[in-house]
Amino acid sequence: MKKSSPLRSIICCLLLVSLLLVTSQPAPAAEPPVVVQSVFSVGFTVSDMDRSVAFYRDVLTFRLVSDVEVDGPEYDQLYGCFGVRARVVRMRLGEQQIELTQFISPPDLRPIPVPSYSHDLWFQHFAIVVRDMDSAWAQLRTHHVRQISPRPQTIPMSNQVAAGIKAIKFRDPDGHNLELLWFPESKGNPVWKRGGGDLFLGIDHTAITVRSTENSLKFYRDLLGLTVAGGTLNMGTEQEHLDSLPGARVRVTGLTSKRGPPGVEFLEYELPTAGRPFPIDSHPTDLWHWQTTMMVPDVELAAARVHGMGQMISAGVVTLPDNSLGFTKGLIVRDPDGHAIQLVSPEYGND
């Protein structure tokens, strides 16, 4: 038998050692998430600001926080539109805020498509917690509010996670979807169990329809750092009547930030499956435009992280001339399904 030469043996040993060194190296650590500090507000575009302010004030008891008009090249860059002049109103219910935006210019406002259903991918709503559902429903009827659900629905005992929760969906004057929630003693965030006499307590979450829960988790959990709080599968006659959608079967996943409500809720419709996609030519001037404002420690870092996973609305991170909107640096980006997220630096809200 032919013997190996000493040189050949040495070479083989070196190759083996090199291979072991390469394969034993740990895989590169995944970059840590951005870690959203809070979901500061939920906002959307309105067609008539005075009408919308009156609705949220008189029907749902929101209180005015600020009312400003903005224009200039920085706002063009933020909203991704040319020639922007916008009136922006912030209102508060409990500890949570909404942000209403009316574009005075440009004048290319488009209404929410009719019909729209909760399994369409542009669907978004926010949920208001109430102290007493019967009284809250009476308030809606007194003001002749357009209801999606014929009456409040109670989640049945067969759904152990959500059993006993009462809910009703309705629309504001522009057709934006809203929800009232009542939690039994054993359910809901402890913040909703505090004493007091207010009927409408605050905003529990904003819900968005998604095509894939797993894909959305990559964006909101793995990239932005929200925490999964729980989930449930809702179906049956109660869900059908809540959504006014026959055969509705929806996988619900709730996420929260470190500072609590409002959270973000995914609605993945298994039946009927995800409906119409987000219009590819959507603009912040469209009435179906919502944006969820999230506070992050470093907006520049957040922009770099989301760049590959979302479609940018803003022209990068925009530095505003003043604090009129409650922040001086931010950007708006779309998630994988088209929902708009406004990422801002921590000074947001410190007017």
Image (cartoon, rainbow, N blue to C red):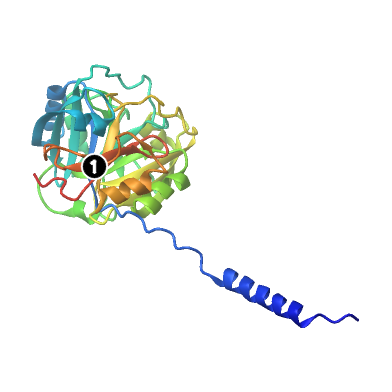
Residue to which mark 1 is pinned: 330
Q: Residue at x 38, y 45 (%)?
A: 156
Q: Is residue 274 left or right of residue 192?
A: right
For residue 31, above or below residue 291: below
- Label 1 environment density (alpha carbons within 10 Å; few <14, some 14–19, many ≥20): many
Image quarter in which the C terminus is found:
top left
In percent of width and height, residue 222 lies at 40, 53
Q: Residue at x 32, y 54 (%)?
A: 34
Judge by depth and name the residue closer to the eye, 183 or 272.
Answer: 272
Mark 1: amino acid: Gly
For residue 39, above or below residue 136: below
Residue 152 visible: no
Judge by depth and name the residue closer to the eye, 284 or 289.
Answer: 284
Judged from the image, the secondary structure of the residue bearing numbered disc 1 is strand
The residue lying furthest to the top in this view is 107
Q: Is residue 239 left or right of residue 322?
A: right
Q: Is residue 248 left or right of residue 341?
A: right
In percent of width and height, residue 9 lies at 74, 80
In percent of width and height, residue 330 lies at 23, 42
The residue lying furthest to the right in this view is 1
In percent of width and height, residue 237 lies at 42, 35
Judge by depth and name the residue closer to the eye, 303 or 140.
Answer: 303
Image quarter in which the N terminus is found:
bottom right
Q: Residue at x 40, y 58 (%)?
A: 31
